[in-house]
Image (cartoon, grey):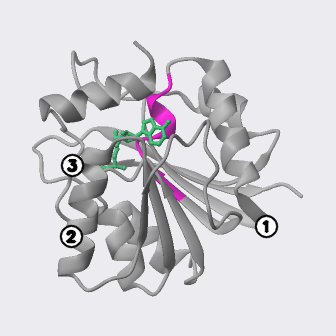
Amino acid sequence: MNTKNRFLEHYKSGFMPWVHKKPDFNLVEMVGNWPIKPCRALEVGCGTGTDALWLAKKRFDVTAVDVSDIPINIAKDHAIKAKQSINFMVKDFLSEDIPGSPFDFVFDRGYFHSYRSAIKRKQVVRAIAARLNKDGLWLSLIGSCDSPPRDSGPPMRSVKEIANAVESLFEVKLIKTSLFGTNQENPANIWVCLFKKRN
Ligand SMILES: C[S@@+](CC[C@H](N)C(=O)[O-])C[C@H]1O[C@@H](n2cnc3c(N)ncnc32)[C@H](O)[C@@H]1O
């Protein structure tokens, strides 16, 4: 089953272990410390929109897309309740236009890492580069292979796999180890990656 259909099935079955109620602290830290200033931002594979909502509250002008309507409807509901204006859209990022492109900042938490094939990961990187302005930044939270073996949980990618996919189109500004910001016990190890589009 391909990545898109896998996630559509996940949402239909209600199995969504990545859903987090609070914004991921890695996003919060990177935006605050790098710093990444409020700008036109795109979240890819936004799920139920927790991080998109946080960005909007921090005065980013946010577009957020997901391939499934199930999380997007939940995300829209959260945004209405929080009185935040966010352009949530159901889109297949790899095959559809994203209105509002190009953006200054792209964020993904667990979208890029979902692709098992190196060819597909390169396709994702090309699609992200195409939706970014000159000097645009991409912050990606990616499951790490430097973790104890486990039977379930997020994909485990190596720095080599990440570099192979991104380096021709992006400068690597930062890669550091961290944990997923989640309400679950024993969060998985991740790479926090900040890339800048090559000109
Ligand atoms: C691991 S989940 C992470 C969701 C969200 N970022 C979070 O952390 O809660 C990956 C997300 O990517 C979405 N996705 C997968 N393929 C996609 C595609 N082709 N276009 C847009 N979104 C996609 C899935 O539906 C899913 O919501």
Name above or below for residue 168 compared with residue 134.
above
Specify the label residue 135 is tagged with.
1
Residue 85: where, in percent of width, then height? Answer: 38, 81
**Residue 109 x %, y %:** 41, 49
The residue that appears at 47% across and 33% down in the rendered structure is: 113
Mark drawn on residue 19? 3
Specify the quadrant of the image occupied by residue 26: bottom left
Q: Position of residue 6 (x, y in %)?
A: 34, 23
Question: Upstream in the sequence, badge 2 or badge 3?
Answer: 3
Marks 2/1 in contact by CB < 8 Å: the verdict is no
Q: Position of residue 175 (x, y in %)?
A: 57, 49
In the image, 192: left or right of 96?
left
Q: CA distance from mark 2 to mark 3?
A: 13 Å
User: Badges 1 and 3: C-beta atoms under 8 Å apart?
Assistant: no
For the point 23% across and 19% down, the residue is: 150
- Which quadrant of the rendered structure holds the C terminus? bottom right
Residue at mark 2 to residue at mark 1: CA–CA distance: 31 Å
Is label 3's Cβ within 8 Å of ligand 1? yes
Could one spot residue 149 in this view of the protein? yes
Tell me the number on the disc at residue 78.
Answer: 2
Q: Nearer the viewer, residue 190 or 97?
A: 97
> Quadrant of residue 87 in the image?
bottom left
Residue at mark 1 to residue at mark 3: CA–CA distance: 30 Å
Q: Is residue 102 left or right of residue 43?
A: right
Residue type indicated by callout 3: Val
Q: Could you say whether the residue bearing mark 2 is in a helix, strand or loop?
A: helix
Q: Secondary structure at mark 1?
A: strand
Q: Which residues are magenta?
A: 107-115
The kind of secondary structure element at disc 3 is loop
Decide: is 186 above or below 129: above
Dot in front, 2 or 3: 2
Kind of residue at badge 1: Asp
